[in-house]
């Protein structure tokens, strides 16, 4: 069993056993496999890349090739206990609508994203005057899939405006968890559990 | 690696009971020709049913008795291949309505004469009825998997929808749950080509020394184009001329593509019965799993416990990805565990029969778990 990425490990640890889970943008199925094998979940996925889907099928996972921006509409209301969107929100054409879809399909939603207001990003922009290229944002602006960079405060503002409840939140710096104090400045990464 | 010799056996089963058909008619004395590969486990839990496509037959991994060519899915089925006959007991039967040993329009009716057009119109579900009867006779209650491409995939879907307790896994490649108008249109062109051939003789050509080979050949030519892709035709043939340096200003097969299609038509007529082609394409045109459920496809799969894998190819314009996606979403809405993937391959609809390594990986992976 490969070591899960820290945000995925946190999510896996907080998904209740035996629940129904949809991982949107599930990649090669690492998290789904952990949820199935270690948490006994009925874990399903959606993934845009065919090679990744083939890798998931080879692991015996149930994964639909599709685009979260369009294909989530086909899932019935409240058909999952959790919908997960890890490291994907910032790549969506309309992140706000995707959040609504996640909470229509899932009773709860896990959403994780890189925080564009981390102090290293801020310094890079302040002194470099160019779009930051950092450990979590390693790709230059013209080829990054991240078309909607956001900060932790941006995210909180959006969910508040949409009447979405934050049930829990974790913040990561490096690979370690840090407190919520000044998270918008100190956290490289945020993971939220949302509900209605 | 040297593959061990394949264990194969061609068998014939005569059904003791009449087959009650969707049309309301019943067919007595049904014969099913089939092949098996591998060994059935003592627990009888390793059976994989492969369903063939329109022009296929039971010779999935053994040489065709007429053409001598390798089985139509030889690259997929065999020892250590993605559908591994060292592990699975593989069954493949000629469909009802076919012409390779199973009862069809060329088979003798009660009066000893070929049915010809007296053969009842059958459906995909009727074909599956025959498959289910075969499984019963073989003492197989559960299938580890049912696998098929094109019309074979449709049989797998029909099995899952109508006999939801039999298959534990369903792999449908380049298939659809509802036959769209464009495909019905091409199927009709094929049938009209056959029926326009004077040698067809309203189907009663069997003892006349003539067969509607020209009509069937044209049907095959038209269908064959739909199985390929524009880019594969361009790459394989382009505008190249056939064994000549200049156009002949006549109607010979000047172009390689013309010669190729004529050859396809000709060889198909030598191995396939024209009336079977009529009945099989009719069954496909009628295929709509949503029909019995007020158009709600998801409800067709309400009772199935099977896992599904739905595969399409980006160059397949006959059964385009959208059909597979619709199917996958319906299965999802039904709560069935389903995977769906659109693979990239240049060969159009025929991609499922050809060299597509990613397909091998998906098939082996889906069956491996």
Image: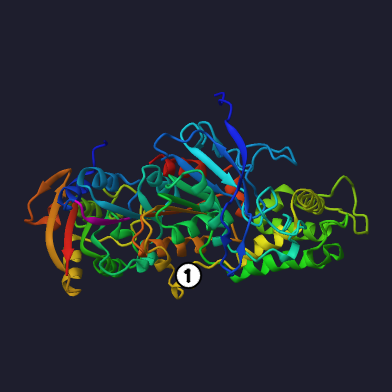
Report which quarter residue A3 is drawn in: top left
The span shown in magenta is A18-24
**Percent x, y for residue B19?**
57, 59
Magenta span includes B187: no
**Percent x, y for residue B131?**
54, 52
| Nearer to the camera, B50 or A165 | B50
| Nearer to the camera, B87 or B266 | B87
* Residue that badge 1 annotates: B290
Left or right placement of residue B224 versus residue A133 in this view:
right
**Percent x, y for residue A126?**
22, 55
| Nearer to the camera, B195 or B332 | B195
Left or right placement of residue B198 versus residue A172 in this view:
right
Label 1 residue SS: loop
Which class describes the residues within 10 Å of circle 1: few (<14), some (14-19), or many (20+)?
A: some
Q: Residue at x 25, y 67 (%)?
A: A78
Residue B221 showing in the rendered view: no
Left or right placement of residue B328 versus residue B34 in this view:
left
């Amino acid at each position: 069993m490969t070591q899960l990425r820290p945000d995925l490990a946190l999510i896996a640890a907080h998904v209740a056993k035996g629940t129904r889970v949809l991982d949107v943008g599930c990649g090669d199925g690492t998290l789904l496999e952990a949820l199935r094998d270690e948490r006994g979940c009925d874990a399903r996925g959606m993934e845009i890349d065919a090679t990744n889907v083939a890798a998931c099928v080879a692991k015996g996972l149930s994964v639909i090739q599709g685009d979260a921006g369009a294909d989530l509409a086909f899932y019935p209301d409240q058909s999952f206990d959790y919908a997960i969107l890890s490291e994907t929100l910032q790549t969506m054409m309309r992140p706000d609508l995707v959040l609504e879809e996640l909470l229509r399909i899932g009773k709860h939603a896990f959403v994780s994203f890189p925080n564009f207001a981390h102090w290293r990003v801020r310094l890079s922009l302040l002194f470099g005057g160019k779009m930051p290229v950092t450990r979590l944002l390693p790709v230059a602006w013209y080829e990054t899939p991240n078309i909607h960079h956001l900060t932790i405060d941006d995210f909180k503002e959006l969910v508040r405006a949409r009447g979405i409840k934050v049930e829990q939140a974790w913040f990561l710096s490096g690979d370690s968890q840090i407190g919520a104090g000044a998270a918008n400045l100190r956290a490289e990464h945020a993971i939220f559990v949302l509900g209605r | 690696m040297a593959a061990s010799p394949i264990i194969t056996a061609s068998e014939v089963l005569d059904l003791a009971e009449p087959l009650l058909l969707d049309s309301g008619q019943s067919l007595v004395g049904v014969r099913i020709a089939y092949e098996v590969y591998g060994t059935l486990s003592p627990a009888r839990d390793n059976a994989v049913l492969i369903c063939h496509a329109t022009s296929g037959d039971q010779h999935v991994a053994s040489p065709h008795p007429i053409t001598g060519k390798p089985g139509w899915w030889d690259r997929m089925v065999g020892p250590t291949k993605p559908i591994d006959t060292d592990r699975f007991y593989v069954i493949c039967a000629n469909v009802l309505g076919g012409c390779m040993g199973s009862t069809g329009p060329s088979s003798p009716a009660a009066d000893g004469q070929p049915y010809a057009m007296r053969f009842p119109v059958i459906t995909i579900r009727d074909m599956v009825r025959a498959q289910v009867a075969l499984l019963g006779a073989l003492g197989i209650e559960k299938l580890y998997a049912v696998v098929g491409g094109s019309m074979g995939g449709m049989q797998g879907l029909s099995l899952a929808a109508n006999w939801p307790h039999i298959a534990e896994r369903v792999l449908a490649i380049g298939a659809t749950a509802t036959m769209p108008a464009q495909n019905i249109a091409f199927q009709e062109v094929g049938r009209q080509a056959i029926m326009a051939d004077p040698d067809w003789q309203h189907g009663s050509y069997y003892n006349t020394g003539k067969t509607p080979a020209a009509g069937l050949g044209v049907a095959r030519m038209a269908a064959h184009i739909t199985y390929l892709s524009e880019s594969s035709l361009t790459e394989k043939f382009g505008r190249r001329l056939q064994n000549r340096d200049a156009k002949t200003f006549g109607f010979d097969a000047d172009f390689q593509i013309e010669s190729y299609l004529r050859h396809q038509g000709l060889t198909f007529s030598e191995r396939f019965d024209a009336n079977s082609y009529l009945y099989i394409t009719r069954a496909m045109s009628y295929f709509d799993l949503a029909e019995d459920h007020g158009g709600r496809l998801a409800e067709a799969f309400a009772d199935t416990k099977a896992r599904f894998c739905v595969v399409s190819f980006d160059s397949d314009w006959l059964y385009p990805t959208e059909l597979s996606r619709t199917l996958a979403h319906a299965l999802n809405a039904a709560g069935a565990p389903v995977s769906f993937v659109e693979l990239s391959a240049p060969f159009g609809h025929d991609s499922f029969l050809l060299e597509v390594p990613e397909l091998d990986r998906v098939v082996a992976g889906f069956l491996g778990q």
